[in-house]
């Protein structure tokens, strides 16, 4: 459509031509931004998918290694595994899901597996649930702890600590006595923390 026909079409529809021209440019810009956003979204999804795939491969590789180490450390389990491999693998998978740390330790995993084998078939899952209840929550690493603390301070969940005093202590035998000065941080009315 040539510009004259486009103008006449716009006039027939009762629109202001200057508005329609500006709208066309805006739609073009929005379309470009949408295509760009879609591209970034697809790229991000691809990277996330590759990360998940790598994590799954790593999990599968470590699960196989841990399983073999458990059988090597507990040779008596091998006969049970040969008798009913599907059930044996199901029990190990349940243990690994409920407590990966126990499943990764060959002697501990062997103990739990023997406990499941000796249990009646309908209560074997309870042994895995018992392993879950004994699971110790993992601590955050120092970088993650700093990020969480910074976030909490940033949104006002953790008030800023203030220096509320100093403590001087003397320790050691008189000939080698040393003096240590520590600063007390905290909020009035709360348990203070001491730092050098």
Image (cartoon, helix red, strand yellow):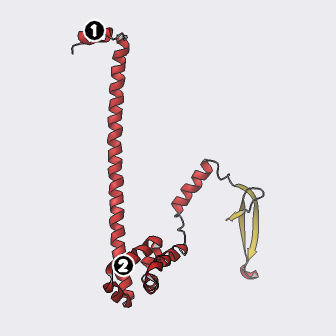
Q: Secondary structure at mark 2?
A: helix
The residue carrying pointer 1 sits among few (fewer than 14), some (14 to 19) or many (20 or more) residues within 10 Å by Cα, namely few
Q: Is residue 44 left or right of residue 166?
A: left
- Real-space CA distance between mark 1 and mark 2, rounded to the nearest whole angstrom: 77 Å
Q: Position of residue 53 (x, y in %)?
A: 33, 60
Q: Residue furthest left?
A: 1
At horizontal 32% and vertical 56% (from top left) the residue drawn is: 50
Q: Is residue 54 left or right of residue 148?
A: left
Q: Secondary structure at mark 1?
A: helix
Pair 1/2: label in front: 2
- Residue 164 is drawn in which quadrant? bottom right
Q: Is residue 116 left or right of residue 158?
A: left
Taking depth in this image into account, of 147 and 132 the one nearest to the observer is: 132
Identify the disc placed on residue 87. Answer: 2
Taking depth in this image into account, of 94 and 42 the one nearest to the observer is: 94
Say which residue label 1 marks: 8
At horizontal 36% and vertical 77% (from top left) the residue drawn is: 89
At horizontal 34% and vertical 84% (from top left) the residue drawn is: 81
């Amino acid at each position: 459509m040539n510009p004259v026909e486009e103008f006449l079409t716009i006039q027939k529809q009762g629109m202001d031509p200057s508005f329609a021209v500006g709208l066309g440019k805006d739609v073009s810009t929005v379309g470009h931004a949408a295509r760009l956003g879609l591209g970034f979204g697809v790229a991000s999804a691809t990277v996330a998918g590759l990360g998940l795939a790598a994590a799954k491969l790593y999990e599968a590789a470590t699960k196989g290694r841990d399983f073999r180490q458990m059988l090597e450390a507990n040779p008596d389990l091998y006969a049970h595994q040969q008798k009913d491999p599907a059930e044996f693998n199901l029990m190990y998978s349940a243990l690994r899901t409920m407590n990966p740390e126990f499943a990764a330790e060959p002697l501990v995993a062997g103990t739990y597996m023997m406990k499941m084998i000796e249990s009646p078939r309908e209560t074997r899952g309870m042994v895995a649930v018992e392993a879950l209840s004994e699971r110790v929550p993992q601590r955050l690493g120092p970088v993650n702890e700093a990020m969480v603390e910074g976030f909490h301070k940033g949104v006002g969940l953790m008030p800023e600590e203030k220096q509320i005093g100093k403590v001087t202590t003397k320790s050691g035998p008189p000939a080698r006595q040393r003096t240590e000065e520590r600063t007390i941080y905290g909020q009035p009315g709360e348990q203070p923390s001491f730092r050098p």
